[in-house]
Structure formats: structure tokens, C-alpha cells
Amino acid sequence: FSTLEETEKFIKLHQHLQGIPSAKEIEKNGLDVGNGQALLLTKIEELTLVIIQQNKRIKKLEKRINTKRK
């Protein structure tokens, strides 16, 4: 999956998440609900992995801060 920075750049450029059809595409071509659900589950998994990474970074930073205070 992409980094948050890469995702942000993609969204700014294309106005939708990478791998997810734009609103215009859905309006024009319709939406396969099953495929749409699979795409959403993929994005949920990606977000969960990003949250886990962020949590690890936060814990590491908190440990460094608490070590310096002692």
C-alpha cells in the first residue's frame, strides 16, 4: 500500500482514493456492489495497517520522551 504522503498526493490530483472509482466513473458506469464492497474492505485493511504503524511510532516516541525526562 501507499504511504500517507503518496495517498494525499493522489487524492489531491485525482479527487478520489487510488483503486476506487471516482464519483464520475460510478455515475457513468454504475457500481458493481460486490466489487465495491471488496474495494472498501481492501481500503479498511490498508487503513488498519497504517494505524498500527502510527501507533508503533507513537509508542517509540513516547518511550524516547519519557527516557529523556528521567
Image (cartoon, rainbow, N blue to C red):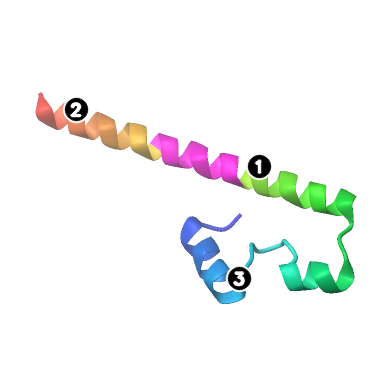
Q: Amino acid at mark 3?
A: Gln
* Sequence order check, earlier mark of 1 and 2: 1
* Sequence order check, earlier mark of 3 and 1: 3
Residue at position x 51%, y 69% in the image: 9
Residue at position x 64%, y 62% in the image: 17
Depicted 59 relative to depicted 38: above or below: above
Q: Amino acid at mark 1?
A: Glu
Q: Nearer the viewer, mark 3 or mark 1?
A: 3
Residue 49 screen position, x and y as percent? 57, 41
Residue 20, numbered circle: none
Q: Is residue 42 magenta?
A: no
Q: Which residue is mark 2?
A: 66
Q: Nearer the viewer, mark 2 or mark 3?
A: 3
Q: Which residue is mark 1?
A: 45
- Range of the magenta residues? 47-56
Q: Which residue is mark 3?
A: 15
In 3D space, how far apart are the residues under numbered discs 1 and 2 (Cα atoms)?
Answer: 32 Å
The quadrant where residue 1 appears: bottom right
Residue at position x 75%, y 73% in the image: 24
* Sequence order check, earlier mark of 2 and 3: 3
